[in-house]
């Protein structure tokens, strides 16, 4: 009970700290690309649940989504809790508490640690370097951290289940796996890679009662995640296939394994240098303290090491390397669990109860010191944190100019688009309208409290981040036809366009060229201005040292000929 109470207090304090950091960050900076996507979806579910009821919110949460769990929770909270970006932080904090309690119970019940040693060993899993990163950490809201949390919780219960003659840990492992699958569809692959081979190897080696216990625990382990797969993944299979096998630039990178193996370094980098160094030191202490009393061969000593736990850390990065995944730094976060676990319980069957006071004090000092360093330096730049330079004030000035001009012209329905994807993007503009201006999704657009409605009918066509999105979301068989269609779409459906200047185009082409639309931005800008229908509104706005845009207002003129009807397309949340 003491360990559980201490872990609960620490996790809640960490949630409050992350909320404070989030508020301060968004006072000056705009939200990150992935965070915009998920907080926009959060607002969509909120709007549906508030206007049509929780059941409608749940239906919305599982239709054309690659994520379900946060939206299922959001639909329940919508009538009770105000919408804010911080809601994502507190949902992640709740799941982090589930992980902390699972680990604390494991260290006490299965490894013989006393309450305070269990808390100390649990804390690094909750306070590693990446968790304090403003992009991808607890203060942010994207699905990589929840995926780590719930896969790690499944790992903790799996290790407990292999140590105890009870079905309860198997069931809790299955529940954690189910929540992971609902958090992100790719969890199925991670779970199979992480737990399939170790469980199969245990079964091959086991006999008698141990074999019967492994087989008896299997239904409890598999039933919850299979239910999630059948209900969510089965229902959304077509959309998920498009999302991960067509749209996603990282999933479709198909790099050679030796290049994709960079995920090993990225997985370790999430831990952060101070905690990684402290964990290696703890590993050395435990290897020395628990060394065999008599001299043994190197083979016998190696056989005592718990390679299964180390494999739980290697499995996520081996999976990513085998699939040739692109170097997204966040998808390797699940590796943190196995690497830290091996550092703290390197031997099979090690009992921490016998750890002598000097070694115990050294372990506690190293880990508590590293975690405190991570927390107190959270405002600094983390290893994985990229500089996010777009200013909130600059983006708000763009929106304010559009709102003021639309009001002067008597427009109540206003549509605008950005024509490239950089620090500025269409998803971010919608996000700021919701969370800074108090708008809510309605009918495909954003309903402003003032009564003005901002439409998003053209956003999808102007948000093609990958070749698959360009092929699917922009009509036309060739680039020529697609560019012509984008220009036509702007004339038909858009009141204001945001166009980059020459320096920004050079930056996009040289540094952000991996985003597919950016390779078309120069020609798209030329063609839009060549129509003669667009005039500048105000002066160029410097968003960052790399990006400057200008607002262009559509002027009256002859409307294009009606286009032929096109087939419906899948919606991607961006």
Image: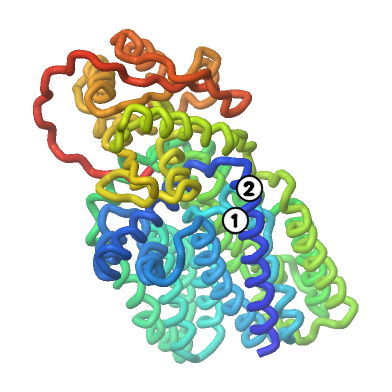
**Mark number for residue 188?**
none
Q: Nearer the viewer, residue 294 or 540?
A: 540
- Give the secondary structure at mark 2: helix
Q: Position of residue 409 (x, y in %)?
A: 33, 27
Q: Position of residue 332 (x, y in %)?
A: 54, 51
**93 left or right, relative to 112:** left
| Vertical placement of residue 304 versus 493, above or below | below
Q: CA gap, disc 1 to disc 2?
A: 9 Å
- The disc, 1 or 2, on the residue closer to the chain's N-terminal end is 2
Dot in front, 1 or 2 = 2
Choose between 253 and 201: the one closer to the eye.
253
Residue at x-position 50% and y-position 16%: 501
Q: Position of residue 326 (x, y in %)?
A: 48, 39
Question: Which residue occupies 44% across, 38% down?
Answer: 429
Residue 528 shown left or right of residue 202 in the figure: left
| Residue 347: x %, y % from top left | 68, 74
Q: Is residue 5 above or below residue 148?
A: below
Q: Which mark is residue 25?
A: 2
The chosen color scheme is rainbow
What residue is shown with label 1? 139
Q: Quadrant of residue 224?
A: bottom left
Proximity of marks 1 and 2: CB atoms separated by less than 8 Å:
yes
Q: Secondary structure at mark 1?
A: loop
Q: Residue at x 62, y 85 (%)?
A: 110
Foreground pick, 173 / 4: 4
For label 1, the crowd category at 10 Å Cα-Cα, with few meaning under 14, some 14 to 19 and many 20 or more, is many
Residue in the foreground of this view, choosing between 345 and 452: 452
**In this picture, is 270 found above or below 100?**
above
Horizontal side of 178 relative to 275 (left or right) equals left
For the point 61% across and 83% down, the residue is 105
């Amino acid at each position: 009970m003491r360990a559980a109470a201490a872990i609960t207090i620490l996790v809640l304090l960490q949630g409050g700290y992350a909320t404070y950091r989030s508020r301060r960050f968004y006072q000056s900076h705009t939200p990150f690309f992935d965070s915009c996507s998920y907080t926009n979806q959060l607002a969509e579910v909120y709007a549906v649940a508030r206007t049509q009821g929780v059941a409608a919110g749940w239906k919305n949460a599982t239709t054309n989504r690659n994520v379900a769990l946060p939206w299922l929770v959001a639909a329940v909270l919508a009538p009770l809790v105000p919408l804010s970006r911080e809601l994502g932080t507190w949902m992640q904090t709740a799941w982090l508490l589930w992980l902390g309690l699972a680990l604390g119970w494991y260290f006490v019940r299965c490894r013989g640690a006393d309450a305070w040693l269990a808390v100390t060993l649990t804390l690094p899993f909750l306070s590693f370097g990446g968790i304090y990163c403003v992009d991808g950490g607890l203060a942010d809201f994207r699905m990589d951290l929840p995926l780590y949390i719930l896969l790690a919780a499944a790992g903790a219960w799996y290790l407990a289940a292999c140590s105890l003659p009870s079905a309860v840990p198997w069931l809790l492992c299955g529940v954690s796996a189910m929540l992971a699958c609902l958090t992100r569809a790719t969890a199925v692959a991670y779970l199979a890679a992480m737990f399939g081979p170790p469980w199969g190897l245990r079964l091959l080696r086991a006999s008698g009662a141990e074999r019967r216990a492994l087989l008896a625990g299997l239904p409890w382990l598999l039933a919850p995640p299979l239910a999630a797969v059948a209900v969510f993944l089965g229902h959304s299979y077509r959309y998920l296939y498009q999302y991960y096998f067509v749209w996603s630039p990282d999933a479709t990178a198909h790099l050679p394994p030796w290049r994709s193996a960079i995920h090993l370094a990225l997985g370790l980098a999430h831990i952060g240098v101070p905690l990684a160094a402290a964990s290696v030191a703890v590993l050395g202490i435990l290897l020395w303290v628990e060394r065999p009393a008599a001299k043994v061969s190197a083979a016998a000593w190696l056989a005592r090491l718990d390679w299964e736990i180390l494999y739980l850390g290697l499995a996520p990065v081996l999976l990513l390397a085998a699939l040739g995944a692109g170097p997204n730094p966040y998808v390797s976060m699940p590796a943190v669990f196995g690497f830290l676990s091996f550092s703290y319980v390197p031997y099979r069957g090690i009992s921490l109860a016998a750890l002598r006071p000097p070694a115990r004090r050294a372990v506690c000092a190293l880990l508590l010191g590293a975690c405190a360093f991570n927390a107190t330096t959270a405002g600094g730049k983390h290893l994985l944190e990229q500089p996010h330079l777009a200013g909130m004030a600059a983006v708000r000035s763009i929106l304010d100019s559009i709102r003021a001009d639309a009001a002067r012209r008597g427009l109540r329905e206003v549509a605008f688009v950005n024509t490239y994807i950089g620090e500025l993007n269409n998803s971010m503009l919608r996000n700021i309208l919701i969370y800074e201006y108090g708008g809510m999704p309605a009918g495909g657009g954003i309903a402003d409290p003032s009564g003005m409605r901002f439409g998003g009918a053209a956003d999808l066509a102007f948000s093609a981040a990958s070749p698959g999105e360009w092929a699917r979301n922009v009509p036309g068989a060739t680039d020529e036809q697609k560019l012509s269609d984008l220009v036509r779409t702007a004339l038909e459906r858009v009141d204001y366009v945001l166009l980059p200047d020459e320096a920004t185009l050079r930056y996009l082409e040289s540094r952000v060229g991996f985003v597919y639309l950016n390779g078309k931005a120069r020609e798209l800008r030329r063609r839009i201005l060549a129509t003669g229908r667009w005039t500048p509104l105000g002066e160029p706005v410097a968003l960052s040292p790399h990006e400057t845009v200008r607002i262009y207002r559509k002027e009256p003129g002859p409307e294009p000929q009606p286009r032929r009807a096109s087939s419906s397309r899948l919606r991607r949340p961006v």
